[in-house]
Amino acid sequence: MLSDFFRINLPYGIARNERNEWMAFNRDYLPIGYNDVSMKGLPGRSYLDLPVYTKYKKVPEKLLLELADDESSLQRDENGEISKVFLYDDGTNPVNRLDEVKDLWVKYFKKLEKLSELRID
């Protein structure tokens, strides 16, 4: 079970489902705000019955590439389209890296700023 506000309520990543809708998920791969690991599933494939996915007008690949730390922070579907993006990893998690916390927080919040520009369809 997650134990702090950051890991429960702030995005670890975003995932696309088969309807081309997106959800933000927390550090335990649960929808943002969820903390019950008995509900754990696969973002993009699970939680389809919950109102956690949103259809955005446009989610360009360029944006998704900017959100990921590197290619290993992306997952692609069978068509080569990006289906999941991780906003940080253990090495770039601003909570884990207290020695670099300011720079990592700035980088993380710039990613959230870019996500906040998405508009619903």
Image (spheres, rainbow, N blue to C red):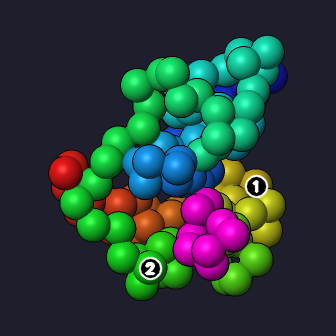
Residue 118 shows in the view? yes
Q: Residues within 10 Å of mark 1 (few under 14, many from 20)?
A: few
Residue numbers of the magenta segment:
77-85
Residue 117 lies, in percent from the top left, at: 23, 62
Looking at the rendered structure, the secondary structure element under dot 2 is: helix
Q: Which residue in the structure is indicated by mark 2? A: 61
Residue at horizontal 75 percent and vertical 26 percent from the top: 40
Q: Quadrant of residue 60?
A: bottom left
Answer whether residue 81 is magenta in the image.
yes
Name the spot of residue 67 as percent of width and height, x first: 50, 72
Residue hosting label 1? 96
x 43%, y 67%: residue: 111
Q: Which mark is residue 9?
A: none
Q: As shown in the figure, which amino acid type bears the numbered disc 2?
A: Glu
Q: Relative to 80, is 98 above or below? A: above
Which tag is nearer the camera, tag 2 or tag 1? Answer: 2
